Amino acid sequence: MNCPNCGAPMLLAPNHDYYACTYCATHYFPQPSDDYVRMLAEPVGLACPLCHGALTTGSIEGTRVACCTRCRGVLVNRLVFGQVVAYLRSRAVKPAVAPRPVDLRQLQRTLHCPQCDQAMDVHPYYGPGNIVIDTCGACQLLWLDHGELASVIDAPGSDRRR
Ligand SMILES: [Zn+2]
Ligand SMILES: [Zn+2]
Ligand SMILES: [Zn+2]
């Protein structure tokens, strides 16, 4: 498909169900977002590591995170992420969804940390969901693409409420 903003070709993001413009970074989401993140409008003074838009505050069950309203990614403290995942999985009400296999193409990209500008580490997440995450060890930050939090929360496992 072509970008509704500039007409350039849009590419399907690896292992994600959305398109990104190759030219102007417009993102197109064929389905409504169901990503456990409520997007708020307060700017946080950081740029999105993926699409370079301005990050704003977001809320995951009342826990403050930074998120991008353009590409719908989420920037979260590593420890907070662990707590949020444990909490949401223990209270899950939706049926579990088997995750897709890890897409190794995602390991090839390099994002830069919005806080310190160093290259982030990209590696498979060791918890549920088969996702690839980008992390900054110095800042204790973790970046999730749109849909990745849902993959983690919705993946089957004994820590998930039946
Ligand atoms: Zn475009
Ligand atoms: Zn973005
Ligand atoms: Zn950093």
Image (spheres, rainbow, N blue to C red):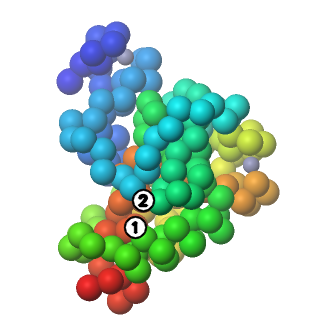
Q: How many callouts does the rendering have?
A: 2
Q: Amino acid at mark 1?
A: Val
Dot 2, how many residues are within 10 Å of its Cα: few (below 14), some (14-19), or many (20+)? many
In the drawing, what numbered circle is on residue 62?
none
Q: Can you say whether 59 is above or below 96 in the image? A: above
* Residue 51 point in image, percent of width and height: 51, 31
Task: Determine whether, in the image, residue 11 is placed left or right of residue 148.
Answer: left
For label 1, the SS is helix
* Residue 161 point in image, percent of width and height: 32, 83
User: Is label 2 in contact with label 1 (beta carbons under 8 Å)?
Assistant: yes
Viewer-proximal residue among 69 and 106? 69
Q: Residue at x 59, y 52 (%)?
A: 64
Q: Quadrant of residue 154?
A: bottom left
Q: Residue at x 34, y 41 (%)?
A: 13
Q: Is residue 155 visible?
A: no
Task: Determine whether, in the image, residue 37 is placed left or right of residue 77.
Answer: left
The residue pinned by badge 1 equals: 152
The residue pinned by badge 2 equals: 149
Q: Residue at x 43, y 50 (%)?
A: 37
Q: Quadrant of ligand 1?
A: top left
Q: Amino acid at mark 2?
A: Leu
